[in-house]
Amino acid sequence: MRCNHCTDAPCVEICPVEALYFRPDGIVDFDNRRCIGCKSCMQACPYDALYIDPANHTAAKCNYCAHRIDIGLEPACVNVCPEHAIISGDMNDPDTEIAQLLAREQVSVRKAAKGTVPNLYYIDGDEASLNPMATEKGGDYFWSAQTRGVGHYAKFTEKLAFSEGDLVQAAMEKNGQHTTAGQVAQNGAAKSIDILMGKTQRVYDAPDKGVLWGWEVSAYVLTKAIAAGAFLLPAIALLTGLAEVSYQTWMTGLVLGLVFLLATGLLLVKDLDRPDRFLNVLLRPQWRSWLVRGGYSITIFGGILALLAVAGWFGWSQVTIIGGIIGIIMAVIVAVYTAFLFAQARGRDFWQSPSLALHMLIHSFMAGGAALAIAGLWLDNGIDWPAYLRNLLLIALSFNLLTLLVELSITHPTEEAKRTVHSILKGRYRNLFWGGAVVLGNLLPLAFLFVGAADPTMLALTGVLILAGIYATEHIWVEAPQRIPLS
Ligand code: SF4
Ligand code: SF4
């Protein structure tokens, strides 16, 4: 669980406010006065080294006791370990004990394939201890029920007593299954037999931090898609002449864009553990973070939508054309930037998919089209607008099914990604995926669009189904990878 002080630290890259940063000596340090509690670093760190400090609701982690290093002391863990099992020092100085051990011993690092270049080495490290995929998670053991608390150590942690007897008692209470001491003993015995038979069993591990990004993040991906798409569809029609865009439709697209952008911002702030510091994203930006780039893109896009609404109201056609072109570029960025943010979360293999940006762009066309189809019930649309909307939705739905197929059927290189795909297709999320995302959100709308042609009521009904399907998909895409333990 200790920080590896990675040379290429994804937590530093993703942190939007420079709360995590490199010191000149290579220590990855942390300043909790800047942290907004976005939990991005916890998604980015492949080693589960960060947690939310329940006292001040900011992220926290081992900082190699930087304050002690500064005055010539060793980290506290090195100091207190009675077996000298933890060795620290300057690896680049050949005279240090650590440099000599590294030269002499067989050492390993955790998850080398992640490319983070960790600076923590294990002598004779056991695969079962270093790799969370090497043992099955399940059954009763200490910490096995630590799933509550959404990204935080559950309250149970505070309850942890000082004796082993108290731990057993607390574990039984937490499980809430009226487990008796006898049952715990039985489970323990079964595990011991497994171990004797050569099958490694997990009996004690790190607390599970649960789902770090919950419904707020799935909902914000949806509202962001609606905001971008509700502008993109009329703007493309207007600039290309593909369909007549009535004044009402144009203004409705702009208003929908603004309202759903506002909802996106509110959801983003709500998801922070320190919402009072949300302005730090804009005022103390760390530009490599896609959270910052996204925050600025949303702000600029909102400004353009507001300007276009004013221009529409006063009939400034030149502003509408120039603003419309810039708006299209910003809408595309707003639609896809989350894919790059997810890709920066290097702890989650499934989010590293190269087609995620395309997936999000297609969703924005679907979501914007769906919202405009519903609003169309009350609007005075252009004559060929319903047909344009229907054709675009047909194309977007077809591409969406194709992208889903590609994303789930390509060969996933890691065990974590394979398990996520399995949980979507055949495991925990199978009903929501097949029933909600595929049938309700894609196949039924496709059938309705074929049967109902461009009938406004049918279009609106299709729109409702599409929005429900996108939410189901995003919920799965956001949550399922987080079910795979990092440690
Ligand atoms: S990625 Fe994790 S282990 Fe590496 S420096 Fe960041 S917090 Fe530490
Ligand atoms: S601001 Fe976000 S990414 Fe940075 S340390 Fe805090 S929780 Fe982690």
Image (spheres, rainbow, N blue to C red):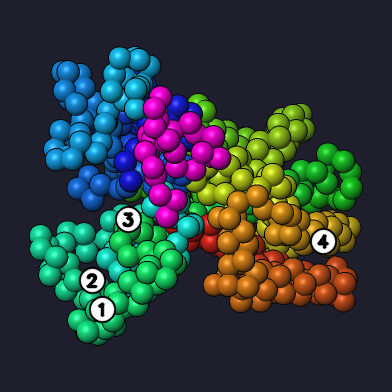
Dot 1 alpha-carbon crowd within 10 angstroms: few under 14, some 14 to 19, many 20 or more: some
Residue 348 colored in magenta in the image: no
Is 137 placed above or below 229 here? Answer: below
Q: CA distance from mark 3 to mark 2?
A: 14 Å
Q: CA distance from mark 2 to mark 1?
A: 10 Å
Q: Which residue is mark 4?
A: 398
Q: Position of residue 342 (x, y in %)?
A: 56, 45
Q: Earlier in the sequence, mark 3 or mark 1?
A: 1
Q: Earlier in the sequence, mark 3 or mark 2?
A: 2
- Which residue is found at the position 21% from the left and 76% from the top? 173
Q: Earlier in the sequence, mark 4 or mark 2?
A: 2
Q: Amino acid at mark 1?
A: Val
Q: Earlier in the sequence, mark 2 or mark 1?
A: 2
Q: Which mark is residue 171?
A: 2
Q: Earlier in the sequence, mark 3 or mark 4?
A: 3
Q: Quadrant of residue 235?
A: top right
Q: Amino acid at mark 4?
A: Ser
Image position of 242 (left or right of 247):
right
Q: Amino acid at mark 2?
A: Ala
Q: Position of residue 290 (x, y in %)?
A: 54, 36
Question: Do the residues under discs 4 and 1 have CB atoms within 8 angstroms?
Answer: no
Q: Quadrant of residue 411?
A: bottom right
Dot 2 alpha-carbon crowd within 10 angstroms: few under 14, some 14 to 19, many 20 or more: many
Q: Which residue is mark 3?
A: 206
Give the extent of the magenta segment: 103-128
Mark 4 or 2: in front is: 2
